Image (spheres, grey):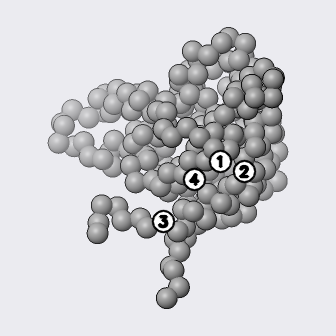
């Protein structure tokens, strides 16, 4: 009897890990790894779109990443601002829309400006939704959600999972079906903790700068051979 495969995941989330270690292994500074890693985003985004994935979330900068060396943080902010322009061109070509997920307060003005322009320019597109997570941390997201919910809801009996989800940054985005983390680390690092409740995890030793379209297809193929039971038998 032929195995029945799962459909292509609707939502794939990726933790882009290993840039610094990849660069160090080559005798280069960590910033070089981030520059090379940024070049992988466009081809992977295109590949995801071609595979039929409807939502792609990329963990670009976490709330904890501010603790990294100042030079590295500065490089990442400049790369992200530059990528907003590249992403806008890509999304308009491919009919995709973009969303910036995370706490925008405290981000550099040029990055905020480019991000707002990106979201506005692609808002009417109906193709794959590219979610770029910047200054995002799941605990921070949930605290912000609870603070806003506290202002709106006085009766605790009104609080449900659906109501709480509506206050999250991902309020209009389905939960991920598949989480991919590169570089061999096997943890979620404060990424989409609420949303990943029933996601399938895929960990690969490949560092992000070496993560190719074939590696993405391999992850999706592995997912399609899984058995998702959602707590059932």
Q: Which quarter of the figure has residue 185?
A: top right
Q: Residues within 10 Å of mark 1 (few under 14, many from 20)?
A: many
Image coordinates for residue 209, horizontal then vertical, percent:
75, 39
Q: Residues within 10 Å of mark 2 (few under 14, many from 20)?
A: many
**Element type at marker 3?**
loop
Q: Decide which of tag 3 and tag 4 comes sooner along the chain.
A: 4
Q: Would you say 141 lies left or right of 71 here? A: left
Image coordinates for residue 6, horizontal then vertical, percent:
52, 71
**Element type at marker 1?**
strand
Q: Would you say 201 lies left or right of 215 here? A: left
Q: Would you say 191 lies left or right of 23 here? A: left
Task: Check disc 2 and report the residue beneath it.
Answer: 45
Are the two marked residues, 1 and 2, in contact with CB atoms closer than 8 angstroms? yes
Q: CA distance from mark 3 to mark 4?
A: 15 Å
Are the two marked residues, 3 and 4, in contact with CB atoms closer than 8 angstroms? no
Q: CA distance from mark 1 to mark 2?
A: 8 Å
**Mark number displayed over residue 218:** none
Task: Check disc 4 and report the residue beneath it.
Answer: 12
């Amino acid at each position: 009897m032929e195995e029945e495969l799962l459909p292509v995941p609707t939502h794939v989330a990726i933790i882009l890990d290993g840039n610094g270690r990849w660069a160090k292994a080559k005798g280069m500074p960590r910033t070089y790894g981030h520059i090379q890693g940024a070049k992988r985003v466009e081809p992977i985004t295109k590949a995801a779109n071609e595979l039929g994935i409807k939502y792609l979330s990329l963990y670009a900068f976490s709330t904890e990443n501010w603790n990294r060396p100042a030079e590295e943080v500065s490089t990442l902010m400049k790369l992200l601002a530059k990528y907003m322009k590249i992403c806008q061109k890509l999304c308009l070509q491919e009919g995709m829309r973009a969303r910036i997920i995370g706490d925008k307060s405290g981000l550099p003005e040029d990055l905020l400006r480019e991000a707002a322009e990106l979201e506005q320019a692609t808002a009417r597109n109906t193709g794959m939704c590219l979610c770029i997570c910047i200054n995002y941390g799941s605990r921070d997201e949930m605290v912000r959600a609870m603070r806003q919910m506290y202002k709106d809801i006085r009766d605790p009996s009104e609080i449900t999972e659906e109501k709480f989800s509506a206050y999250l940054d991902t309020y209009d985005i389905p939960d991920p079906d598949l989480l991919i983390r590169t570089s061999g680390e096997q943890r979620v690092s404060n990424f989409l903790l609420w949303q990943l409740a029933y996601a399938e995890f895929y960990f690969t030793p490949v560092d992000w700068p070496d993560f190719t379209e074939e590696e993405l297809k391999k992850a999706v193929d592995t997912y399609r051979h899984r058995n998702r039971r959602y707590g059932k038998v």
